[in-house]
Amino acid sequence: MTLNELCEATVQAGASDLLLHEGEPLALRITGGIARIDATPVPADVFDALWAACGAGPEARDFDTAYVSGRGERFRVNLFRHLGRRGAVLRHIRAEMPDLDDLGVPAPMLREWVARQSGIILVTGPAGSGKSTTLAACLNHINESSSRHVVTIEDPIEFVFRDNASIFTQREVGIDTASFADGLHQALRQAPDVLFIGEIRDPDSAVTTIRASETGHLVLATIHGADTADALERMSQLLPESERGMLARVFASQLIGVLAQRLLPCITAGFALAAEYFVNVGAARTYIEESRASDLRDFIDRAPAEAAMSMLQSVAGLCRAGIVSESVALATVDKPGELSRALRGITSLTSRR
């Protein structure tokens, strides 16, 4: 099969990922599992074509980019080497835009967040937890509901937006701009109303995000973190020490809220989304400004559902509903003993919501 035929087979099978190892049969990830659909080893010329199409040099070892097939299907691509041979994973980026109501996220809350004219919205979670999909759904809602100029800086672009009520300018790191920081700086000169940053990963991006929100822009971004409090600690660590106090105050005033995601395998098939979130209200602002992570976690545990939801509470809800197994739930949370007690009605967690 040619490279384009492999991509078409991935789409037709409804697979999320195409996994290629040189000299070995191809594999597809379908509804979370791995399936081999052909015992024929993938030949070297497929990798030659993929390396060339992605602009990777012959000696490239680790390379992230995007690929558009002959039929216009878009893939996020990671090229790598293992045991001296070439390998690649191509994630199919679906053309249809995700809808917030279909993702398992707190959709009404997110719609309220993105209706704001300025501020910062952060989404965090491990790789493959659906962060990009959630933010694409948020941007799609903006595109359908308000007239704004949305500028995105991504690495790589995963969803291609067609202008509707809003106008989109999408820029890919390495193709349209040198880095997230450079793209963000230039975006401020492009009359944006909304900025989407694929990832806040360096001090320059963190500082510019805060300053952009302070000057009247709505900024949506992902940031590395295991949970909401961890994401905010990461943001604090990225701020230059000489300006940390002042920037932390501005950040605490501009932050709208944080959403943390994890995808858990369902008992039947597929995955369910567990979501931790908090709205930046009341005492939370002080905890953020003063980097009091333990107090923030306590706030998330005790606040009413309209203000916060912990990961443990979200996972417990999925388990009680029979969507995920207890073993999966216990392996997901940081405090399995507390979850076990909550599932048996021993703590107030089951009655608080």
Image: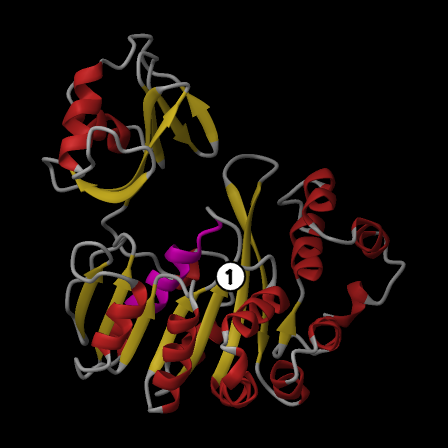
Which one is nearer the viewer's eye here, 317 or 203? Answer: 203
| Picture layout, residue 105 above or below residue 6 | below
Q: Residue furthest right?
A: 346
Q: Residue furthest front?
A: 242
Residue 25 position within the rendered picture, expressed as x and y whole percent measured from the top left: 34, 13
Which one is nearer the viewer's eye here, 99 or 161? Answer: 161
Quadrant of the image containing the C terminus: bottom right
Count residues near mark 1 (Cα–Cα under 10 Å), then give few for <14, some for 14-19, many for 20+. Answer: many
Residue at position x 79%, y 49% in the image: 336
Which one is nearer the viewer's eye here, 285 or 65? Answer: 65
Any magenta on residue 194?
no
Quarter of image, res 163: bottom left
Q: Is residue 144 left or right of residue 53?
A: right
Residue type at mark 1 is Thr
Q: Is residue 310 left or right of residue 47?
A: right
Main SS, magenta region, reads helix
Q: Residue furthest top?
A: 40
How many numbered discs sit on the rendered protein? Answer: 1
Q: Is residue 162 left or right of residue 135?
A: left
Residue at position x 44%, y 52% in the image: 130
Residue 303 position within the rendered picture, expressed as x and y whole percent measured from the top left: 71, 78
Q: Is residue 210 left or right of residue 87?
A: right
Residue at position x 29%, y 8% in the image: 40
Give the residue at mark 1.
124
| Picture layout, residue 69 above or below residue 34 | below
What span is in magenta? 129-140
Q: Residue furthest left?
A: 70
Residue at position x 17%, y 69% in the image: 169
Residue 132 position within the rendered picture, expressed as x and y whole percent measured from the top left: 38, 56
Quarter of image, res 72: top left
Q: Secondary structure at mark 1?
A: strand
